[in-house]
Amino acid sequence: MGWKTLDDMKLENRVALVRVDINVPMKDGAVLDNTRIARVLPTINDIIAAGGKPVLLAHFGRPGGAEVAELSLQQVVPALSAALGREVTFAANCIGGPAKRAVAAMEPGDVVLLENTRFHKGEEKNDAALAAAMAALADIYVNDAFSASHRAHASTEAIAQLLPACAGRSMAAELAALEAALESPSRPLAAIVGGAKVSTKLSVLRNLTERVDHLVIGGGMANTFLAAQGLGVGASLVEPNMIETARGILDTAAEVECVIHLPRDVVIAEAAEADMPTQIIPADACPEDMMILDAGPETVQALIELLDNCRTLVWNGPLGIFELPPFDAATRAVAEKAAELTRDGALVSVAGGGDTVSALNRMGLAGDFSYISTAGGAFLEWMQGKTLPGVAALRASR
Ligand code: ADP
Ligand code: MG
């Protein structure tokens, strides 16, 4: 903990500047995925219910400090209004006259959305003057954008030092879930790290080795670890320049008594294509012309038994090429087990990462996990053990 929530703030008759992440995918003026909008509704509704006035602060795309008409947040207003069941007022600038007038005109129950913060160069520079101009609009600051909090920007970091600051509902839920998973977990604690490459998850692996009791390495990156143990991986995806690094991680794990779990058997095929003829072989015997594309049934069985004995699971990265059945089998079987244990109250399960969340959604299992982080980059930085500037600023707030 160490940060305030909405429950700690006086909200009645106060203007609350709420940093949200409504950077939603759009096509032809329509929002393609409403997930991010749905996540900010509890905070906005709770502020209104307490008699406060929510003024929303957000970025949209990458305008790079210029006013780019196609990246105006105005286009999100219809979807946001529909989701809230209230007409949202739009202000054409996040500071200055337009913002001040919109805020001054607010009646109880009104919601104002301010224009894209990234239209100002100072946003990505964490500029104090821009933060002060935004802070001048409000009485308190609420950060409900965990997914934007790995960046020290004026609307996530500098501003939190200028106003009494707290976490919004989604932010508080995400922080609580992540703390329960890695900072003060029930043990034994297992992590599954899969996906394509060791090189993109090096700091994640290093941090987790220090923290978890069991580290499962799967997906394409497991091949590099198999190679590091002198096993042949045939034509599989492998990173030769990461083999030394992989050995180092195995050595560190042995020192800190973190048990590393690598595939015992694997599913191989001639190419990474759907519905290829497959074989199951021990993980030490991949022929030269074959590729490892999923973990095998013996490995899956071992992981299921491991989960039976764990209390907490953190998961990032699929165990195989889940996009191409049948190479989704291991990811699916282990996800089903994690979902079942979570439903039974035997396991706390947290998963994140773009492809991981998409795999769990596709399998219809995301709802059964204790928490699914859709924060992308912020989730990975947290997995690396980094302090997120937006979160640190909340902790430091008066
Ligand atoms: P996330 O987005 O959840 O962080 P990654 O982007 O690291 O996950 O990894 C996902 C990718 O890893 C998927 O596209 C998947 O096809 C790929 N992958 C998984 N197993 C293998 C494998 N054995 N060989 C090659 N690629 C793999
Ligand atoms: Mg990915």
Image (cartoon, grey):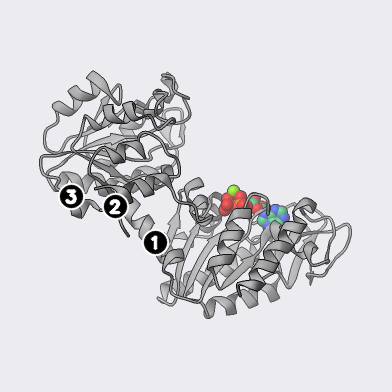
Q: How far is mark 3 from mark 1, CA to CA?
A: 22 Å
Q: Earlier in the sequence, mark 3 or mark 1?
A: 3
Q: Residues within 10 Å of mark 2 (few under 14, many from 20)?
A: many
Left or right side of 96 for 221? right
Q: How far is mark 2 from mark 1, CA to CA?
A: 12 Å
Q: Quadrant of residue 303?
A: bottom right
**133 up-or-down from 45: above or below:** above
* Residue 170 at x, y percent in the picture: 33, 51
* Residue 351 in view (yes/no): yes
Q: Which mark is residue 169?
A: 2
User: Which residue is at a point 40% across and 66% down the rendered structure image?
Assistant: 180
Please tell me which residue lies in front, 102 or 78. 102
| Residue mark closest to the camera, 2 vs 3 | 3
Q: Residues within 10 Å of mark 1 (few under 14, many from 20)?
A: many
Q: How far is mark 2 from mark 3, CA to CA?
A: 13 Å
Instruction: Say if mark 2 contacts mark 1, CB within 8 Å.
Output: no
* Residue 228 at x, y percent in the picture: 78, 63
* Residue 320 at x, y percent in the picture: 67, 59
